[in-house]
Image (cartoon, rainbow, N blue to C red):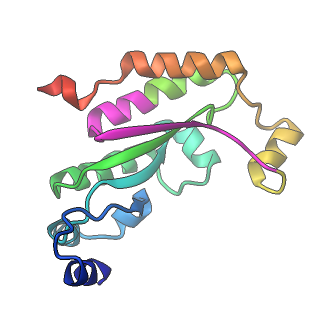
Amino acid sequence: MIAVKIHEYLPKVETIAMYASIKNIRGKSDEELRRLRSLGINELNIGVESGLDEALSRMNKGYTAEEALTELARLNAAGMDYGANIIFGCAGEGHSRENAEATARLLNETKPYLIFTGTIHADPGCPLYDDMQSGTFRESTFGEYLEEEERFLSLIWCRCMDT
């Protein structure tokens, strides 16, 4: 395992950060997660993206918000910190408020140590771009992006507020 080799060559390393997905977590037992944490694996960067099932489905994430909640709770139980990546606008035009509220609910319940935000973007050749061109997905307006972020920020409860 790479974590063992890292500690062999760099014994002072305390934390090994990496990217992970909800599907990666789902594929590990609770014991495997605890073992990874004991080897210094921590501060995972996870593409949660949204707490809204419709948006997760459109992005082909392969899990529901409830499944994300379950897997992130398992990381918490294993003592692993993680940052959550979320995407404003991923629910499309007219769904900004709904996406902000669902995503804030999910993150308030799971309490990541860090939240990364971005906005939806599609390049030619990807399915979302094709959906935008055909009109089956309508991108949020600039104002909706701002409203979504503002709503999300008004609802999010930071870890520092728990102390």
Residue 6 position in % (x across, y down)? 27, 78
Seen in the image, is 156 located left or right of residue 54? left
Q: Is residue 95 magenta?
A: no
| Image quadrant occupied by the C terminus | top left
**Which quadrant of the view contains residue 96?**
top right
Q: Residue at x 74, y 31 (%)?
A: 139
Q: Is residue 160 above or below residue 155?
A: below
Q: Nearer the viewer, residue 95 or 161?
A: 161
Q: Residue at x 56, y 37 (%)?
A: 118
Residue 45 position in % (x across, y down)? 40, 53
Q: Is residue 116 magenta?
A: yes
Which residues, given as a range, are shown in magenta?
103-123
Q: Is residue 161 above or below residue 36?
A: above
Residue 70 position in % (x across, y down)? 30, 50
Q: Is residue 87 above or below residue 152?
A: below
Instruction: Tally the numbered discs.
Output: 0
Seen in the image, is 11 located left or right of residue 69? left
Residue 73 position in % (x across, y down)? 25, 49
Q: Residue at x 17, y 72 (%)?
A: 35
Outermost residue to the right? 134
